[in-house]
Image: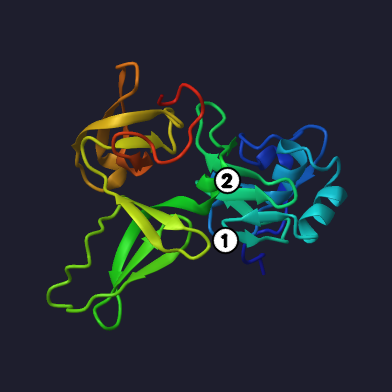
Amino acid sequence: MGRMGGRRHLKALAAPRFWPILRKEYTWTVKPSPGPHPINRCIPLLIIVRDILGYAKTSREARKVIAEGHIRVDGRIRRNYKYPVGLMDVLEIIDTGEAYRMIPVPTKVMTLHPIPRDEASFKLCRIEGKTTVKGGHIQLNLHDGRNHLIRVADPANPVEDRYSTLGTLKLAIPKQEILDYIPLKEGVLAVIIGGRNVGRVGRVLEIRKGIRRFRSIVTLEDINGNKFQTSLDYILPIGFDKPVISLPEGAWQ
């Protein structure tokens, strides 16, 4: 009988290309645990501590740092060295007070960007889907595996339901309270989270709907006036007049 289920190990050559690891020096690398992000949109906590932040030289040292509880992700201490840190996650170093946000950037696909301490109190989550649950309440399914319940007083007239799919929620962490809502519409600022234009920031000019998300095309304009297009599935709204999160210099200033 053949093997059933996924494999527990990952070879370095098969890892996502944006992971900063030595692919030809070592055969194996750490495989992220199943969790809030898919493997092609996350970086394991061990690789972040060892290869990106440089707080350890070896895998054993990195696992010890993580197990001692020095790292916090989205407001919660994570001791699993395989924990996947993905899009818009907030990572904090408790002892030094440093804070970072995982954001998409050109060519590198995804990286940690330093942010001020006050910005580490919230994160952005894209609404991937909506469902109606028992009692007529609305459940929002977010991109990082979270489910947020919107309680409705009158199911026949759900005035509390003002949220649409592919819009962005600004959530307080770790309490998960909704601080703001950015719908996906013409005129908002958005960042590209996939494809050849990954990491680019622009203002949405036009949304041309097709069959399903990947066939819908969005036209954007960057800060220099250059227009570009991408799939609707790669759009993440991040603000109205200006981004609500810190971005690398030159992205949108």
Q: Amino acid at mark 1?
A: Gly
User: Mark 1: few, some, or many residues within 10 Å (few <14, many ≥20)?
Assistant: few
Residue occupied by mark 2: 117
Q: Is residue 198 above or below residue 75?
A: above
Q: Amino acid at mark 2?
A: Arg
What residue occupies the far bottom of the structure in this picture?
Answer: 135
Q: Residues within 10 Å of mark 2 (few under 14, many from 20)?
A: few
Quadrant in which the C terminus is drawn: top left
CA separation, marks 2 and 1?
26 Å
Residue 220, given in percent of the width and then of the height, sits at: 28, 28
Residue at position x 68%, y 60% from top? 78
Res 251 quadrant in image: top left
Rendered image: mark on residue 27? none
Number of numbered discs: 2
Mark nearer the N terminus (2 vs 1):
1
Horizontally, residue 135 falls left or right of residue 201, namely: left
Q: Position of residue 80 (x, y in %)?
A: 72, 60
Where residue 237 sits, quadrant-wise, is top left
- In the rendered image, the quadrant that contains the N terminus is bottom right
Residue at screen point 65% across, 59% down: 33
List the residue tagged with mark 1: 35
Give the residue at x 70% y 54%: 71
In the image, 142 versus 78, the foreground residue is 78
Position in image of residue 52 (x %, y %): 71, 37
Query: Residue 122: x and y, percent?
Result: 48, 52
Helix, strand or loop status at disc 1: loop
Residue furthest out toward the left: 157
